[in-house]
Each structure stands twice: as C-alpha cells, then as structure tokens.
C-alpha cells in the first residue's frame, strides 16, 4: 500500500454526562482535572479506546488489553507477542519493518520494543542470572499523534460514598462485612481533543491512506462497546469529528493554526461550532457526526 500522501489534522468533540471519563489512580480515581478545573482525558486513554475499536474491526493490534484480546491470540505479554510474531532474532531496521507490517497500532502510533535477549553480558559485576542479561531496544516513531482532551469549561465533580456487602469467603450463609468506598463522576462536560497524521513519518512505517481512512471511520464510534460502571452506556458520546485533509505532504500551514480554528471559539452544549472559522489557510474541513 502507498504511504500517506497528504497531511491530515483532526479534532474530536465529545460529551460526558454523569460519568468518570478517565480516573486518576493517584487521586482516589477521581476524574482528572487540571489546575484550572478543566476536565482531562489523557492521550493514552484515547489511544487505548481507539486500539480497542480497531481490534473489533479486525485490525491486528500489538498493545492489547487482557479483557479484549483478539480471538486466537494466546500471548500473555508484549514480549511473547513480539517474539511469537517477529521471531527470536530481533534487532535492527528489518525487525522494525516487520513490526509495522504486522500491527496497525505500531505503524500508526509507533512503539518501543525493549526485549531481553537472554544472553549474558561480559561484565565482572554481573553475578546472577538477571543482572547479566543483555537486550535490544528498537524505537519506532509513528505518524499519528493524539493530544489529551480537555473540557471547554471547568467541570463539576460529584463524589458519592457507597457501601457493599459481599460474602467473599465461606459457604455463603453468613453476611460479609460492609466495605465503604467512593464513586466519582463528571456531571456534564464538553471535551475536545486534537490530532495529526504526518506523511513524512508515514513513509518510514508504511502507514497508508487506507489506514488513515480506517481511523477516520472509527473515531465517531470511539466510545462504543466501552461501557462500565464508571461510564454507563450512553454517558460518553462523540458529537463530531472534524477532519482537515491538506493537499500536500507539508500542508498549507501548521497543525497549530489549523487546530486554533476550533480551539479559539466557543463550542455549544451539543457540539455546535462556527464552521466558517474552521478553514484556516484555506483547508476546508469535513464535519463527521458522531455515531
């Protein structure tokens, strides 16, 4: 397949209502916020959801979550998956090329392969089995970047104390002790995330026009099949995807100027935007409604 020929910028506008879009494990799993009170969903979280949608669509994915492992994939770790698909002789540009061919997310987002070789380093201080292991590190820089999403206005976080009573042990005839806990949610918020696709880096990984179309098709469905107790069905909704496709590899202007067309205007409660202000440098976007 031909590598991506045109620079692409995009934005995702989504709504959160009575959900915890991305809990912070260092803060009691409260929804992430910055110092100004704006809600945040990290880029890692968004890429995880996009990987899941790509996997459901049949694309091979390297970084899989345990509960969504592809059918027939029996690898229990990334190391096992890398060696199982790429073979034992890992290293160099040829391995990077094979990895990009094998997995969609590697050629899109890039990946760092850091794998022990099992060989012993010739160092006098290496006295045990682990200390003397040598390994390889293969870095692949992907053409697709996605920024963390931030709410357009400060969000209100509601915390609710809960109790649960579960008989975790015994024959079930006795009641377990009550356990206290907390649940947190964002009452309502409109978030926006921005991303880009770089043709120069796409040439190195083989990321193609067809790959870009696959992402374009799945971004409106980003939160489908992603429900949980923290994110009930329907509480996370993509309102629209804004897709700027330039007419050259370099693009007519920087991604910053393209994104500013959306970033510097008010976004309505249902994702309403002034489309006339989105065509920076003459790059007219395609507005794709959410699924």
Image: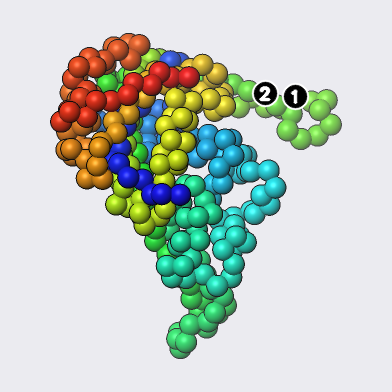
- Taking the spot 45% from the left edge, 40% from the top edge, the residue there is 210
Q: Is residue 183 visible?
A: no
Mark 1 nearby-residue class (10 Å; few <14, some 14–19, many ≥20): few
If you read the primary sequence from the N terminus, does the residue marked by circle 1 or circle 2 appear first? Answer: 2
* Residue 260, image x, y percentages: 19, 29
Which image quadrant is residue 196 in? top left
SS class, disc 1: loop
Q: Are marks 1 and 2 in contact (CB under 8 Å)?
A: yes
- Find disc 1 in the rendering and name its residue: 175
* Residue 252, image x, y percentages: 18, 38
* Residue 288, image x, y percentages: 38, 21
Q: How many marks?
A: 2
Mark 2 nearby-residue class (10 Å; few <14, some 14–19, many ≥20): few
- Taking the spot 52% from the left edge, 38% from the top edge, the residue there is 54
- Tell me the number on the disc at residue 227: none
Which image quadrant is residue 259 in? top left
**Does residue 23 lie above or below 145 as drawn?**
above
Q: Is residue 284 visible?
A: yes
Of residues 277 and 262, the one drawn nearer to the viewer in this rendering: 277
- Taking the spot 43% from the left edge, 15% from the top edge, the residue there is 17
- Find disc 2 in the rendering and name its residue: 165
**Does residue 48 lie above or below 21 as drawn?**
below
**Seen in the image, is 242 located left or right of residue 231?**
left
SS class, disc 2: strand
């Amino acid at each position: 397949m031909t590598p991506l020929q045109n620079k692409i910028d995009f934005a995702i506008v989504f709504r959160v209502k009575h959900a915890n879009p991305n809990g912070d494990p260092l803060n009691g799993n409260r929804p992430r916020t910055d110092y100004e009170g704006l809600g945040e969903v990290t880029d890692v979280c968004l890429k995880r959801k996009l990987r899941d949608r790509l996997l459901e669509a049949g694309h091979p994915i390297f970084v899989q979550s345990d509960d969504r492992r592809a059918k027939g994939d029996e690898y229990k770790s990334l190391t096992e998956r890398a060696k199982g698909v790429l073979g034992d002789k890992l290293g160099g540009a040829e391995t990077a090329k094979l990895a990009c061919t094998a997995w969609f997310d590697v050629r899109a987002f890039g990946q760092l392969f850091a794998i022990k070789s099992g060989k012993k380093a010739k160092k006098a201080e290496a006295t045990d089995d682990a200390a003397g292991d040598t390994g390889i590190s293969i870095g692949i820089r992907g053409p697709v970047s996605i920024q963390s999403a931030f709410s357009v206005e400060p969000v209100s976080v509601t915390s609710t104390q809960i109790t649960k009573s579960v008989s975790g042990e015994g024959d079930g005839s006795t009641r377990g002790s009550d356990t206290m806990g907390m649940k947190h949610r964002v009452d309502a918020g409109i978030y926006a995330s921005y991303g880009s696709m770089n043709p120069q880096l796409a040439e190195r990984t083989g990321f193609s026009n067809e790959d870009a179309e696959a992402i374009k098709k799945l971004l409106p469905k980003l939160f489908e099949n992603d429900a949980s107790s923290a994110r009930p069905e329907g509480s996370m909704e993509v309102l629209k995807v804004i897709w700027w496709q330039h007419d050259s590899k370099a693009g007519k202007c920087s991604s910053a100027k393209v994104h500013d067309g959306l970033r510097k205007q008010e976004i309505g409660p249902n994702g309403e935007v002034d489309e006339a202000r989105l065509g920076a440098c003459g790059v007219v976007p395609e507005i794709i409604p959410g699924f």
